[in-house]
Image (spheres, helix red, strand yellow):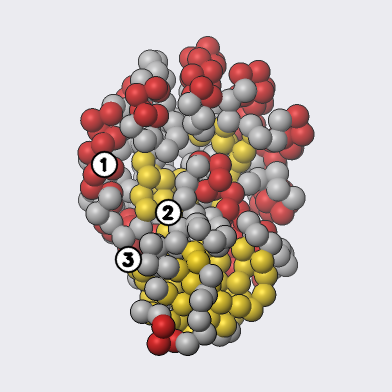
Amino acid sequence: MLLIKNGFVVDPDTGREGIGDVAVGLDGRICEPDSKREEDYESVINAEGLYVSPGFVDTHAHFRDPGLTYKETLHTGALAAARGGYTSVICMANTEPAIDSVDKLMEVKGRAGREKIRIYQASALTMGRRGEDLVDIEAMAAAGAASFTDDGSPVMDADLLKEAMERASQFGKVISLHEEDPSMVHLAGINDIKAKEMGFRGALPEAESLLIKRDGAMALETGARVCFQHLSAFDSVSLIESFKEKRPELIHAEVTPNHFSLTQDAIDQYGALAKINPPLRTERDRKELIRGLEEGIIDIIATDHAPHAEDEKKRGLEKSPSGIIGLETAFSLATEYLIEQERMPLSTVIKAISLNPARLYGLEGGSLKKGQVGDITIFSLGEETTYGTFVSKSSNSPFLGQTLLGRIRYTIVGGKVVYSA
């Protein structure tokens, strides 16, 4: 058994906030602390001066495995997740080959089960993520696909997407949507305003908002649950808000720490390390994303952890791939830019980083209620973390070398410590 004592407990599921103890039984689940005597427990953590919350849940990460393991593997991705306080992660399907069959899904799940955090695997929505033919949604759902997404590629065939929504809704599965109309993306990863300053065309914000408008209406029509991934644009938030007013149980959205922390001007300082899809946009967009998160319009903080090799990011703005790693820095960015700068309640942040993602995707965790899995994150808001190195296999981050508020002290999965600072 594990006893965590004297910590400030924050559990959005039960509404618990205050100093107290949390215990995990031999079955790896939350239980009542039966005794105050430390000798009655196998392990004791004195969390005095620290915060105790449900383990973080990331529903949007790229571990590049199979096929691109020079960037990341299931193992290095799991290590990065644990260091960042994450106890559960959903991996996207844009691997090589794409996860579009039961055999491929089961192979990844088999290897993922050997890691110390909970790794779930999304299924591609279409075969090869080409947007032409749907995967066998029923078979993939039965095999344990966490969700369906062609992340990295929008589904431009509206009829095909409507059929996918109708079928996925039958099995209670979420369709997660990357919304960027290619006809409005000239150079991906750079906001069009910033790109014009540099003499070329970039990605227009309308590329995102117009597809959200189409697909939100389709979700309401079909009754499908959808999650709009990595919002970046001002108008996108108001669209989500209007759809949510009609059917809040169907419409969901996520924001990345990169998008609520940085603007397009990061390109001037960090170059390709700040190139990401959809791109970092203006301060007006950033502030609106924070409003959406604070008001519950945006449900989820998701990292979009996107590893790339060092030489790939040195190819310049035009030729380098888009993406920033995020699992290790996410909590510090939330501490620095949401809690410290915006005075956002800690419970709001924890809800978006644990309870909401677990509930939407039907994962274990996200709660410290008795009987729930003993997945717990212990952290400090006052301590700093210097990101001199990463345990991820890649280091493509504008925050490399920076010191930020917030420090993960322990990550616990099923009552077992998988990371300790």
Disc nearer the start of the sequence (3/2): 2
Residue occupying the point 66% across, 23% down: 220
Residue 391 numbered mark, or none: 3
Residue to which mark 1 is pinned: 108
Rendering quarter of residue 104: top left
Instruction: Kindly state the secondary structure of the residue where label 1 is placed.
Output: helix
Q: Nearer the viewer, mark 3 or mark 2?
A: 2
Q: Is residue 117 visible?
A: yes
Q: Amino acid at mark 3?
A: Val
Residue occupying the point 51% across, 22% down: 170
Residue 88 numbered mark, or none: 2
- Measured in 3D between alpha carbons, the distance from the residue under mark 1 to the one under mark 2, in whole angstroms, is 15 Å
| Residue 40 place in picture, x, y as percent | 41, 83
Nearer to us in this view, 21 or 339: 21
Pointers 1 and 3 in contact (C-beta within 8 Å)? no
Pointers 1 and 2 in contact (C-beta within 8 Å)? no
| Residue 284 place in picture, x, y as percent | 72, 49
